[in-house]
Image: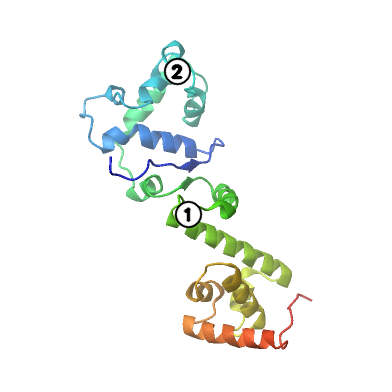
């Protein structure tokens, strides 16, 4: 009654294994929570959709799509032998050692998918952040926006990420990118200094202030690749 809101996770469902991992995590929850005895089948736990995936079509709700999950397990078809094999696979998995690190995304994360998929979700979310979004989502949105700005600046300057980082810490090109990040994102000076190799936060602050002073006085032009 007094716990947080239900857990919602955005999952990539393009036959890449992420959907199957999420469903398996949910179906194995009774085992992790020790709600089943060792000799009890997963099927014995009544408050789960697992038993519906094993039932014949006429004995399950029409909204249950078995093809997606069976397909994730390499079983192509809603046939009795495939449903039986699916149960066997899950029963074997309940005894496997699970990496706690691999479970963090289900317990604390908000997105399960490839880097490209997560990037698309962050771009969609960027202008729609509200009070209901977690601190992690806000942080990752800010990081994605910053990386987008860096990518555009690298293209304009005609250099690679490593080349920009390798320039001297007082390089005007590098400071111009840093100033834009400071102006258009929520990145701290410390984070910007680490990302662009600007030295210590204190020194980076001094260099940025000097660059801004020159820029406001018209002493700094916009750099462009030749």
Q: Residue 169: in sight, yes or no?
A: no
Depth check: 8 or 112 in front? 8
| Disc number placed over residue 137 in the picture, else none | 1
Q: Of the residues under marks 2 and 1, which one precedes in the sequence?
A: 2
Does 108 sit left or right of 33 as displayed? right
Residue assigned mark 2: 61
CA distance for labels 2 and 1: 34 Å
| Disc number placed over residue 175 in the picture, else none | none
Residue 13: quadrant of the picture: top right
User: Which quadrant holds the N terminus?
Assistant: top left
Q: Residue 59: in sight, yes or no?
A: yes
Instruction: Describe the element under mark 2 as helix, strand or loop.
Output: loop
Vertical arrangement, residue 198 with respect to residue 1, above or below? below
Does 83 sit left or right of 120 as displayed? left
At x 37%, y 35%, the residue is 26
At x 53%, y 71%, the residue is 195
User: Which quadrant holds the C terminus?
Assistant: bottom right
Packing grade of label 1 (10 A; few <14, some 14-19, many >=20) is: some
Which residue is situated farthest in the top direction here? 58
Q: Position of residue 59 (x, y in %)?
A: 41, 12
Q: Position of residue 129 (x, y in %)?
A: 53, 53
């Amino acid at each position: 009654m007094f716990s947080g809101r239900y857990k919602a996770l955005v999952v990539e469902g393009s036959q890449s294994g992420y959907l199957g991992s999420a469903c398996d995590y949910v179906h194995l929850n009774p085992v992790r929570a020790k709600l089943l005895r060792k000799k009890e089948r997963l099927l014995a736990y009544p408050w789960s959709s697992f038993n519906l995936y094993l039932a014949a079509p006429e004995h399950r709700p029409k909204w249950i799509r078995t093809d997606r999950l069976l397909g994730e397990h390499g079983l192509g078809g809603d046939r009795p032998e495939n449903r039986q094999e699916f149960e066997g696979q899950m029963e074997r998995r309940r005894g496997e050692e699970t990496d706690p690190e691999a479970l963090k995304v289900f317990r604390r994360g908000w997105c399960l998918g490839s880097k490209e998929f997560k990037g698309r979700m962050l771009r969609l979310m960027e202008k729609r952040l509200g009070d209901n979004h977690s601190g992690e989502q806000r942080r990752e949105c800010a990081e994605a926006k910053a990386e987008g700005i860096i990518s555009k600046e690298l293209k304009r300057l005609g250099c690679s990420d490593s080349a920009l980082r390798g320039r001297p810490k007082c390089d005007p090109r590098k400071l111009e990118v840093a100033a834009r990040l400071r102006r258009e994102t929520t990145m701290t000076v410390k984070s910007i200094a680490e990302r662009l190799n600007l030295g210590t936060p204190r020194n980076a602050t001094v260099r940025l202030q000097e660059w801004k002073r020159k820029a406001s006085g018209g002493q700094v032009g916009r750099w462009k690749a030749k």
